[in-house]
Image (tube, helix red, strand yellow):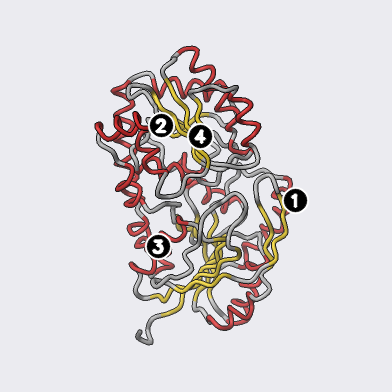
Amino acid sequence: MGESVKKLLFIQVMWTPYNHARFSSIASECPGWNLHVFYQTTGNAYRRWRAEEKEDRYRQVFLKHVRIPLRPDQAFSLNINYNVFSELEKCDPDRVIVTGWDSPATLAAILYCKRRGKEIILYSDSTVHEKSYRRRIFKPYVRILVRFFDGFLSGGTAATEYLRDLGARGNIEPFYNTVDVDHFMKRGLLSESERKKERLRLGLDPASGVLIFSGRLVSIKKVDMLIDAFHALQREKENVHLLIAGYGPEEARLKRLARGNARIRFLGHCDVNEIPRLYGISDALVLPSIEEPWGLVVNEAMACGCAVVVSDRCGSSRDLVSGNGLVFEGGNPDALGGALRSVLESGNRLRDMRRKSVEIIRRFRPQDLVGAISYFR
């Protein structure tokens, strides 16, 4: 490797297949950088991803940590990475990008970069809709913290607006949240005959309307509101199904709300190789969250040809939904019910939405997005 190649370090919360796809694309598409990634933790109780410990395209380090739970119902924790300084010294990066401002590792990186005269960039996908008590208390602190960064990356339009609200000045570049689009298209874009065969295998009527929710079963996702809306939809349109892929602390309560409805199916954990075919047999993804910085399941489902019904509290609603689905007022049961009825009312309109999803998401392939970011050049 030539001397002109510099070191780019990301400090990321945890390994996920989404982050892995993005980092692999940076490593492949940006030959001027030798990419390193520090992970603050290996995961949590409600995200069953197995980190790929061996990685040839970029160097990854799983920092030693002590985990302090903050919101057990949503699996959020504070990670104390007690070896972060020593790893920063060993890495000796030319530029550091930290994801998020609410960790000791971020503070350590700021201190290291300011002492060594290195450039530090903040990547954030937070939006104004994240209204936790902790967020309100610490907002003045965050306003001060953003002054220490040399530049900013945002997860999308809503995240850019929130960074401006926090006082971020200068360059903010959108590095849109995305997934390995090619992987999901390859496994989830099914022909009509494949869709019919797969539906029959799962005991679903090939002619029925199929809605899918995918994600953690936690309160902010509002799956309870979706189940209630589905019960109401069934009274008007009997031939519909609701698939719920995921797990979490709300699971038992949600199953009680489903009241044994045979057309509501809880699928449990589905990994990145299983979920594409479930999207592929579904007509629309529904994401009714009242807090959602982005909602990567929207990208996944669109790549598999789903229409989308998304709350306006989801960051992706600003950048991914245009003619391929509907955006409704978050937390409003009537608005959700109306959106479900509308998206299923016309077969031709639904097919157009599904085709439009694929057209839009082709522009959000990670290997294409990284080339637009000046911090990767």
Side of 89 where 178 appears, left or right: left
Amino acid at circle 1? Ile
Judge the density around disc 3: few (<14), some (14-19), many (≥20) Cα neighbours within 10 Å.
few
As drawn, the label of residue 137 is 1
Which residue sits at x=33%, y=31%?
A: 353
Q: Nearer the viewer, residue 4 or 235?
A: 235
**Tag 1 secondary structure:** helix
Q: Which residue is mark 4?
A: 244
Instruction: Name the amino acid type tagged 3.
Output: Ile
Instruction: Kindly identify which residue carries mark 2.
Output: 284
In the image, taking residue 153 as reference, residue 136 lies left or right, namely: right
Query: Of the residues shown, which amino acid type is indicated by label 2?
Result: Ala
Q: Which residue is mark 3?
A: 373
Marks 2 and 3, how far apart at CA = 32 Å
The span from disc 1 to disc 3 (Cα, nearest Å) is: 32 Å
Asked whether, in this view, residue 19 is left or right of residue 98, the answer is left
Does residue 323 appear anywhere in the picture?
Answer: no
